[in-house]
Amino acid sequence: MYQADEQRYNKMPVRRVADTGFMLPAISFGLWRNLGDQQPYANSRELILSAFDQGIFSFDNASNYGPSNGSAEETFGRVFEQDLKPYRNELVITTKAGFHMWPGPYGEFSSRKTLMNALDLSLKRMHLDYVDVFYMHRFDPKTSLEEQVETLDLMVRQGKTLYVGISNFDAKQTAAITKLFKAHHTPFVVNQSSYNMINRTVETDGLLDVLRNDQRGLVAYGPLAEGLLTDRYLQGIPDDMPIHWSNQWALDQGTDRLVKKLNDLNQVASDRGQTLAQMALAWLLHDDVVASVVIGASHIDHLLNNLKAVDQMSFTDDELAQINTILDR
């Protein structure tokens, strides 16, 4: 029978979103890849439980994670039912709806019917009575914000989610929907967006400022840019490298130029006693508006190595200036 490591909360910093009661581990565990129906269950279980033993109490999912829709939620649900159910009060379990989930016009985006059906399916797959955060996975240009906000507010009142979030909303979209959440007194806490050293759109767009001013937080996904911010590509980037849509533009400047940046960043990391991946994670957390960064892993050693980022999260002004100079080239 699984028993969690009694020292788990001594291993991972906890971050609070402004003055709300919502708290997250500095690093959360995402099930986007490597934990769906194409992976051995035993490996997925080991990763999830190891993450919890390291102080990661936040697990991030979505209705379309898999690769088969819903299979990542089913994997997590099986681990929850078998091992983590006694720890439910400690866990922050999140999921999302908005990208393609099932056939037909209601299988994506954010109509009332779509969101309600998606959350009910997620709860069933994960063997839960409620989730801690339910996100709209992307901006819906056709459904009114009022309908979307009223639907999420109803979910909270029904006890199906404790908090609500948005994902992939830009600064203008976030500001608009935040006003509506405030009018409904809906507990909106975080925007989950792509953010890493290569993709700094949330800075240039003004999203970080919007969230900071409204006392909300950012959860950063894709913090290692599909592995670009590791030592894997210091010798070169293959032409056919698959990369998430949110980071594709980074390759437009040419791979040779990007590889030079990666090597320069790697030198800064080495001087700090970190790997490039560890520094990339720590760098995101130097801004307190970032509530957590979501990482994935396919092997235990990857997970444990990346978690060492929390051992050195402070940066000197000179280090930050050096990193900005490299990134701005």
Image (spheres, rainbow, N blue to C red):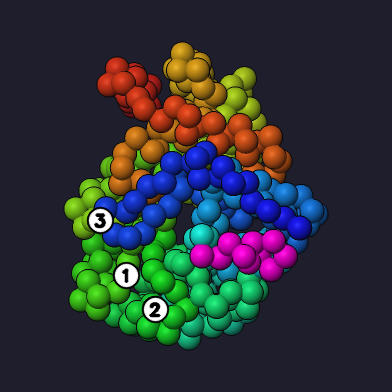
Q: CA distance from mark 2 to mark 1?
A: 8 Å
Quickly name the residue at label 2. Answer: 156
The residue lying toward the viewer, choosing from 316 and 268, is: 316
Judge whether 166 appears above or below 42 on screen.
Answer: below
Judge whether 266 appears above or below 254 on screen.
Answer: above
The tag on residue 187 is 1
The tag on residue 229 is none
Quickly name the residue at label 3. Answer: 19
Please say if the residues under marks 3 and 1 sit with CB atoms less than 8 Å apart. Answer: no
Answer with mark 3 or mark 2, whichever residue precedes in sequence. Answer: 3
The residue lying toward the viewer, choosing from 15 and 317, is: 15
Q: Is residue 244 left or right of residue 161?
A: right
Q: Is residue 107 visible?
A: no
Dividing the picture into quarters, in which one does residue 324 lie? Answer: top left
The kind of residue tagged 1 is Pro
Q: CA distance from mark 3 to mark 1?
A: 12 Å
The kind of residue tagged 3 is Asp
Q: Residue at x 47, y 79 (%)?
A: 160
Is 87 in the magenta? Answer: yes
Q: Residue at x 36, y 71 (%)?
A: 141
Q: Which residues are magenta?
A: 80-89
Please say if the residues under marks 2 and 1 sit with CB atoms less than 8 Å apart. Answer: yes
Badge 1 marks a residue whose secondary structure is loop
